[in-house]
Image: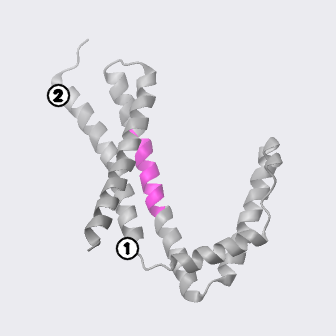
Amino acid sequence: MRVSSVDDVIAWATFAGAWLLVAGPLYQGSVELGEMQFDHQGIQGQAAAAQEARTRPSAWWWLLPPVMYVLYRRWYKALRRSMLAQLTETQREQFTSFQSKSTGWFTVAAGATLLAAGETWHIVRHYAWPAWLFWLLVVVMLAVAVTNTAVRMLSAARERQP
């Protein structure tokens, strides 16, 4: 049974719209995070010092993934406490603000990716394409969204330089 052209247009419009909802938060999050006043070097230096003082759990624990998960979480929490204790109050505020914003934008982009995957599946089903094409489309569309953000950010950085 052939589907009408209106159904085709709607299927492609929702597919495109869903993927724009992926690209938008990736780009907007990159812009906002890039505009933040942030002591990158100071915070990275403290993070590196804190990481040197703490030994990561051995990779052998991956043989027991639940144990590795618990050990890694404990290690990460201790590392974070140690790093935050070494930062100035301003650096702590900058770090937590950056982390909150990046988590928020990542969550929006991840949710949009799930919706876009659903719309991609609808396109594949609409045209009775093979299932492998679904995975190819998802990978290609994610690559397009990330590349779009990278190109725009690099272009904006070049325009700011004298």
Q: Residue furthest left?
A: 5
The Cα–Cα distance between marks 1 and 2, rounded to whole angstroms, is: 43 Å
**Viewer-proximal residue, 136 or 151?**
151
**Viewer-proximal residue, 113 or 60?**
60
Give the left or right position of residue 42, taking residue 159 as reference: right
Quarter of the image for the C terminus: give it. bottom left
Residue in the image at 39% along x and 63% along y: 30
State whether residue 57 is above or below residue 47.
above
- 113 magenta-colored: yes
Residues in magenta, as a range: 104-116
State whether residue 75 is above or below residue 90.
above
Hey, which quadrant is residue 62 in on the image? top right
Residue in the image at 37% along x and 73% along y: 35
Q: In the rendered structure, which disc, 1 or 2, sits on the residue that comes first in sequence?
A: 2
Indicate the amino acid at tag 2: Val
Q: Residue furthest top?
A: 1
| Mark carried by residue 6 | 2
Q: Residues within 10 Å of mark 2 (few under 14, many from 20)?
A: few
Residue in the image at 42% along x and 69% along y: 33
**Residue tagged 1:** 35
| Mark carried by residue 3 | none
- Rendering coords of residue 88 (x, y %): 60, 87
